[in-house]
Amino acid sequence: MSVIVVLTGIFELLVALYFVRDVPFYLRKEYRVVKGVPSEIMYQEGSGRVSSRLSVKIEGETFNLPPRFVDTIQKNKDKPMEIKYLPITKWYVEMKSNDQLLQ
């Protein structure tokens, strides 16, 4: 049983390190920016314990966004968008369409 606990701890540490690598970029507000019209929008409705998922592809980069943005993304799907995001995790920081902040 202790081997399982150690392996689980190592896995959790590796996962945490992946996210921690974005902290310096976040603190210095050094975001990457992609601009363009979405080439692909994928929405999967959740059921039971499975959460809904929303993905948007712009200029070859895929971003996983909160499902609450599905209506906003659909309304702006043919318009140029700008997404500011963290470089390691690709978590969005800010989204705009026609210079309007999308919320």
Image: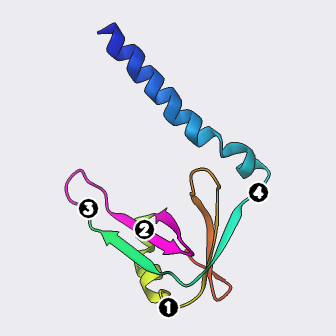
Disc on res. 102: none
Disc on res. 46: 3
| Mark 3 secondary-structure assignment | loop
Q: Earlier in the sequence, mark 4 or mark 2?
A: 4
Residue type at mark 4 is Glu
| Mark 2 secondary-structure assignment | strand
Q: Which residue is the extreme one toward the top?
A: 2
Q: CA distance from mark 3 to mark 4?
A: 33 Å
Q: Residues within 10 Å of mark 3 (few under 14, many from 20)?
A: few
Q: Report which quarter residue 19 is drawn in.
A: top right
Q: Is residue 50 left or right of residue 94?
A: left
Q: Is residue 103 left or right of residue 48?
A: right
Q: Which residue is mark 4?
A: 30
Image x and y of residue 86, in percent: 64, 56
**Nearest to viewer (mark 1 / mark 3):** 1
Q: Which residue is the extreme one toward the left?
A: 48
Residue type at mark 1 is Asp
Q: Earlier in the sequence, mark 2 or mark 1?
A: 2
Residue 60 is inside the magenta segment: yes
Residue at point 36% right, 63% down? 53
Q: Earlier in the sequence, mark 4 or mark 1?
A: 4
Disc on res. 78: 1
Q: CA distance from mark 1 to mark 3?
A: 25 Å
Q: Which residues are magenta?
A: 46-65
Q: Which residue is mark 2?
A: 55
